[in-house]
Image: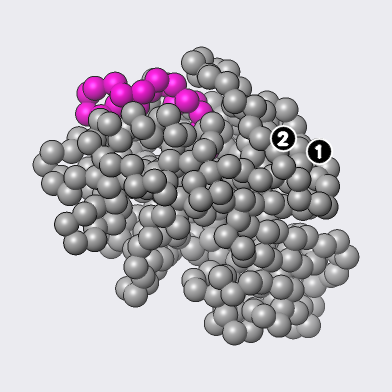
């Protein structure tokens, strides 16, 4: 799917552009992603740049484990949240503009996750340090960094977050390297790298690299997440040589199998969700799992979608996508979104979002075909936000040559992520 590789990024922001070309064959790679910081032309000219070096790692193959989970990460909802689809599209595209396409203890760790802002995002609790300090983090298959706010961050103290305190951990060790991120909406974060003991779902990782924020802009203050735990491949990490928590769990053989299962609940059905590390939870799966090949060449969970259907009618052919639990909507390439909008009589709002008819009886489920099987986005999820007599669609568009397959899709389909083959296995989810 993805071609090319990452090289060391220069510390100065520089322009880059996509290598645009059609990809009618699902086996053909995604567009080349340039190797330096970018200015991506998207709706409203969102830009994002990450100053980093990226490293690649390999794993060995194993099949998913079928045992039910013993520990669970849960998600909660924020009743005061007001949805903003435009911001979600901007956030998603800005995120990938950075790259312009990175059994000695418990064998299975289950982390219950909480549903934040009525399906905006999902977060669960991990601990860092000795004795353990608790943090709510966004489990994100679209990134590879473990990033947490720290007491060294003066601007973070007014953000009402839990801050990691290195002075209170006996296992903290300074690394010395620095990291920095700038997003297209003007938000920034930077800090230092350290190592400490990290525990998720009862699985303990010693000397795990953590990125401590010593500076965050005010835009990070409005959510309950203390940080992000990336679940993509190590080659997408923002600091050269860092191994992700998952890659360290695999290397230390603390998971029965090198996989994790993801179930994201819906706020309308009680919210919540679950990440199962080392296996998957069969009680949240309808029918059989379908295997879909993954291209990890750019560090992400890249898949091929052979077609899109509205009900039983084909509306678009093949395209590429990234499975991303850290993105709220289904963000489609402009050409794909145009065909979807036409099928649903949706109006382009000119900001990456679409106004869709509110009458659900006139809508049909959207189907993404992967691995020879159709996986549905039900009618309820085609409507993301209602404002008066208008409804905003659960899909959007960006100036990208691949789709960001976010929670609009993942709330309705259980996914087992396997880093070693690599592959994913997908089935309709069950509450």
Name the residue furthest left: 361
Mark 1: few/some/many CA within 10 Å (<14, 14-19, 20+): few
Place of residue 148 in the rendered image (x, y in percent of width and height, measured from the top left): 66, 68
* Quadrant location of the N terminus in the rendered image: top right
Q: Residue 235 or 310: which is nearer the viewer?
A: 310
Query: In the figure, 273 relative to 255: above or below?
Result: below
Query: In the figure, 197 relative to 385: above or below?
Result: below
Query: In the figure, 62 relative to 119: above or below?
Result: above
Q: Is residue 401 magenta?
A: no
In the picture, the disc for residue 7 is: 1
Place of residue 291 in the rendered image (x, y in percent of width and height, measured from the top left): 47, 27
Locate residue 22 relative to residue 345 in the image: left or right: right
Q: Residue 13 or 371: which is nearer the viewer?
A: 13
Span colored in magenta: 303-322
Report helix, strand or loop for mark 1. Answer: loop
Q: Is residue 356 visible?
A: yes
**Residue denoted by label 2:** 34
In the picture, the disc for residue 396 is: none
Place of residue 284 in the rendered image (x, y in percent of width and height, measured from the top left): 35, 47
Q: CA distance from mark 1 to mark 2?
A: 9 Å
Q: Residue 32 or 312: which is nearer the viewer?
A: 32
Name the residue furthest right: 176
Report helix, strand or loop for mark 2. Answer: loop
Residue 182, image quadrant: bottom right
Q: Which residue is at 53% across, 19% downward?
A: 22
Locate residue 45 relative to residue 311 in the image: left or right: right
- Name the front one of labels 1 and 2: 2
């Amino acid at each position: 799917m993805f071609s090319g590789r990452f090289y060391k990024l220069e510390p100065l922001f520089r322009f880059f552009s996509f290598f645009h070309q059609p990809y009618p064959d699902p086996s053909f790679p995604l567009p080349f992603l340039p190797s330096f910081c970018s200015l991506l032309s998207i709706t409203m000219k969102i830009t994002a740049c990450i100053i980093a070096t990226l490293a690649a790692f390999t794993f060995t193959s194993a099949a998913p484990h079928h045992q039910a989970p013993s520990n669970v990460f849960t998600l909660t909802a924020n009743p005061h949240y007001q949805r903003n689809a435009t911001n979600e599209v901007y956030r998603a595209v800005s995120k990938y503009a950075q790259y312009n396409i990175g059994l000695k203890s418990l064998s299975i760790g289950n982390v219950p996750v909480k549903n934040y802002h009525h399906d905006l995002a999902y977060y669960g609790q991990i601990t860092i340090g000795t004795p353990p300090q608790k943090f709510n983090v966004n489990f994100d298959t679209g990134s590879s960094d473990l990033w947490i706010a720290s007491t060294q961050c003066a601007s973070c103290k007014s953000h009402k977050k839990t801050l990691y305190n290195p002075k209170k951990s006996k296992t903290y060790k300074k690394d010395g390297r620095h990291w920095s991120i700038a997003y297209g909406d003007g938000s920034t974060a930077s800090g230092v790298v350290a190592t400490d003991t990290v525990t998720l779902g009862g699985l303990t990782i010693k000397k795990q690299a953590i990125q401590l924020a010593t500076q965050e802009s005010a835009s990070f203050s409005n959510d309950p997440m203390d940080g992000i735990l990336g679940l993509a491949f190590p080659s997408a990490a923002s600091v050269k040589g860092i191994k992700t928590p998952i890659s360290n769990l695999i290397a230390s053989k603390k998971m029965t199998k090198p996989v994790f299962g993801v179930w994201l609940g819906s706020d309308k059905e009680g919210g919540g969700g679950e990440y199962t590390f080392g296996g998957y939870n069969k009680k949240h799966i309808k029918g059989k799992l379908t295997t879909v090949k993954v291209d990890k060449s750019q560090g992400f969970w890249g898949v091929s979608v052979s077609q899109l259907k509205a009900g039983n009618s084909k509306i678009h052919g093949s395209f590429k996508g990234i499975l991303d639990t850290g993105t709220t909507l289904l963000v489609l390439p402009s050409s794909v979104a145009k065909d979807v909008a036409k099928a649903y009589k949706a109006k382009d709002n000119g900001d990456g979002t679409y106004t869709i008819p509110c009458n659900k009886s006139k809508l049909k489920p959207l189907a993404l075909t992967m691995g020879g099987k159709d996986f549905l986005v039900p009618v309820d999820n085609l409507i993301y936000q209602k404002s008066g007599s208008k409804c905003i669609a659960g899909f959007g568009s960006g100036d990208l040559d691949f789709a960001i397959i976010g929670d609009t899709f993942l709330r309705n389909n259980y996914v087992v992520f396997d880093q070693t083959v690599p592959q994913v296995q997908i089935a309709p989810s069950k509450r």
